[in-house]
Image: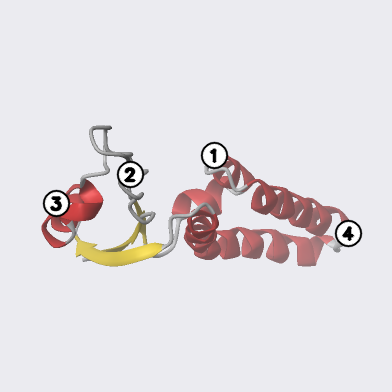
Amino acid sequence: MKLYTVHAEAPPPPGPEGWPEPKARPPVLVREGFSLAAAIFGPFWFAWNRLWWEALGFLVLTVAAGWLLPEALATIAVPALHVLAGFEARDRLRARLARRGQPLAGVVAAPDLEIAWFRLMQQRPDLVRAAP
């Protein structure tokens, strides 16, 4: 069973009578745990997910470790940085969503993403109405 965190913004206030309801951004489900893609691809994964500062910091640390450390230490430090990126990637993604106005709204346990959306519809139909 995998855990997914649900990030959704508060519903917008209703508009004037007779006007269409304002739409909220759809909720985002982020899987909990290690991200193998972030560990392998590093700064590319961060940039793909629009985590620009994290991508730049990871790139700078990796290049600095490769150039400044002795070769014996660099062969340990660079893979360690990649493993650290894999463990931290989804937490950084959650922090970006919270900064963007989509704080944590709940947690869903499911074997895959489709069933997680189904369970979210059962638990919180008010959030799923905003989905496209």
The residue at the point 66 percent across, 53 percent down is 54
Q: CA distance from mark 4 to mark 3?
A: 50 Å
- Give yes or no for contact between labels 1 and 3 (Cβ–Cβ under 8 Å): no
Marks 1 and 4 sit apart, C-alpha to C-alpha, by 28 Å
Task: Kindly report the distance in space between the C-alpha atoms of the residues bearing marks 4 and 2.
Answer: 45 Å
Residue located beneath label 2 in the image? 26
Instruction: Name the N-terminal-most of marks 2 and 3.
Output: 2
Spot occupied by residue 76 in the image (x, y as percentages of width and height)? 69, 65
Where disc 3 sits, the SS reads helix
The tag earlier along the polypeptide, 4 or 2, is: 2
Q: Which mark is residue 117?
A: none
Which residue carries the number 4 mark? 68
Q: Quadrant of the N terminus?
A: bottom left
Q: Residue at x 32, y 39 (%)?
A: 23
67 relative to 93 in the view: left or right: right
* Labelled disc at residue 118: 3
- What secondary structure is marked by label 1? helix
Vertical order, 17 against 67 (above or below): above
Query: Can you tell which of label 4 and label 3 is closer to the viewer?
Result: 3
Q: Around disc 3, counting alpha carbons within 10 Å, would you say few (fewer than 14), some (14 to 19), or many (20 or more)? A: some
Dot 4 or dot 3: first in sequence order is 4
Q: Quadrant of residue 44?
A: top right
